[in-house]
Image: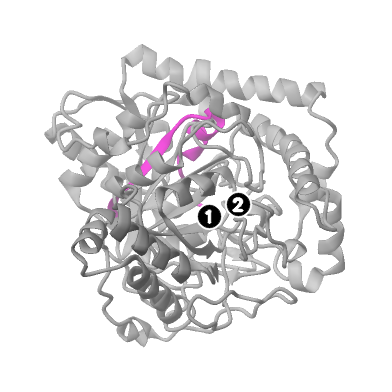
Amino acid sequence: MRGRAIDRRTFLHLSGAAGALAAAGLGGVSTRTDAAPPEAAPVSPQSAGAVRPFDLDEAPIADLQRSMENGSLTARSLAESYLGRIEEIDRGGPGVNAVIETNPEALEIAAALDEERRAKGARGPLHGIPVLLKDNIDTGDRMMTTAGSLALAGRTAAKDAFIVERLRASGAVILGKTNLSEWANFRSSHSSSGWSARGGQTRNPYALDRNPCGSSSGSGAAVSANLCAVAVGTETDGSIVCPSNANGVVGIKPTVGLLSRAGIIPIAHSQDTAGPMARTVADAAILLGALAGIDSADAATAASEGRAHADYTRFLDARGLSGARIGVARNFFGFSEKVDQILAAALDVMKAEGAVLVDPANLEKAREHGDAEFEVLLYEFKADLNAYLASAGGSVRTLADVIDFNEKNRDREMPFFGQDIFVTAEGKGPLTEKAYRKALETCRKLSRKEGIDAVIREHELDAIVAPTGGPAWMTDHVNGDHYSGGSSNAAAVAGYPNMTVPAGFIGALPVGISFFGAAWSEPTLVKLAYAFERATRVRKAPRFLASVEA
């Protein structure tokens, strides 16, 4: 779930993941659990030309629903089409390698939903819609939940995560699991986003030698490559918005507590959340409404009562920017002249659409809580992971067990980078320690009271905007990730919502803009992001190029 804050490049990499999966039958399950997968084969410059047109390219949920209603599609044929696309594009052809495992029951589930539609009608907008889940989200079925680690390979969860229960209740078809940066990229300070021992390396579908960012790498790449209708990612700091930025899609990191974390392999309860990843704001809004809900197993969700919405599409407003007061957090600019140019054009669009820009409206305190944030994550990771593993059963029951497994399987688990973050976290004490309590207090004060809340109150803002990040960097297993900049940590540390939308391209590589605001302001962010999307229409499907110049 963890992405890197730009002011702390030395200690953490944005999570991403995937790898060269063995070819499997349609709807089959990847069984590569006893050894690390080989790295993906080199891609020739002709790879893009080998990608055939796909009937469902860029198809939004509303169009898919209309096709199922008029009978030109069924849920089963829809699932078959996406599974075929995964075989052709993800496991063969360009080898994006975003999907770590497909659901062997997907077609059976889809057929049952077709019968239900004929008998009773659709449950709602997700009825029969194929959804991919990040491989740190429990599913109580035949698929594994491993966080990309061989230490958990072969493990199946006893029951669905709460958000998966919500998806099934909405009629969604769980198509499979996506690769991720192993352990949501909280293992090593020298990791390469998009790599896990179980899955290997996920590639960016815009340029296959570029990184998909992470840790929800597979979810971002899969949505962008049209391997599913929508996907679910998770974030602690940057792990939804960064891969959304790098893969040219929409991502929503909700307020902590809007979505339950029960049944999700954790990093840190003060910042963790799942969230939607989609090709359009409307599709992300549909998915957000389905995922939200109060769960007795996650106390943080109690705060969402009266603040959550079952239908976020009612906030879609093409004129949503008119009269909106938007602050420009200039302290997140300046890391790239080309990104600044894209953001300048985006701000001009907002003004033309009637927005009132307060420029600058800086979040200066975002530079000050980096060390405290990392301290909080280290303490909470040990406590939260130990609790999750103890309840999950199996032979691996503690962080210490995982560290030991990795040491005994260094050739498979640590061929490129180690586990220094794991070791540091294991050395931390309980959450009652003064160092943890002080760090958490510092984070909350600087990110909330003296951060986002203060700036919004001072300037009477509806939201704040900043560049989500730079274009995708070249994947480098020797030196690790090459970050240029980003703005995820302001909302991440506060536990506040953050929404990214494609804003432009640097060469063939997409770049996004982030809208973030106060706690529970998802309706406002959806409105603003939708109006911006409608005014710009930046999203372009990837071409699976072997390489590009940025």
Q: What residue does disc 1 label? A: 214
Rate crowding at label 2 as few (under 14), some (14 to 19) or many (20 or more) other CA atoms within 10 Å. many
Residue occupying image coordinates x 32% and y 15%: 459
Is residue 239 at all visible to an observer of this figure? Answer: no
- Secondary element at tag 1: loop
Q: Is residue 210 magenta?
A: no
Q: Which of the 4 image quadrants contains residue 228?
A: bottom left
When the figure is inspected, residue 149 is found, relative to residue 548, above or below; the finding is above
Is residue 479 at all visible to an observer of this figure? Answer: yes
Of the two numbered discs 2 and 1 on the same chain, state the one appearing first in sequence.
Answer: 2
Q: Which of the 4 image quadrants contains residue 119?
A: bottom left
When the figure is inspected, residue 273 is found, relative to residue 75, above or below; the finding is above
Q: Is residue 116 left or right of residue 236?
A: left
Quadrant, the C terminus? bottom left
Which of these two is toward me, 278 or 191?
278
Amino acid type, label 1? Gly
Spatial CA span between label 2 and label 1: 8 Å
Q: What residue does disc 2 label? A: 13
* Outermost top residue: 458
Q: Position of residue 268 (x, y in %)?
A: 66, 38
- Which mark lies nearer to you, 2 or 1? 1
- Secondary element at tag 2: loop
- State if disc 1 and disc 2 touch (CB < 8 Å): yes
When the figure is inspected, residue 359 is found, relative to residue 198, above or below; the finding is above
Q: Which residues are magenta?
A: 482-504
Which of these two is toward me, 127 or 334?
127
Which of these two is toward me, 487 or 395?
395
Q: Position of residue 340 (x, y in %)?
A: 32, 44
Residue occupying image coordinates x 59% and y 52%: 137
Amino acid type, label 2? His
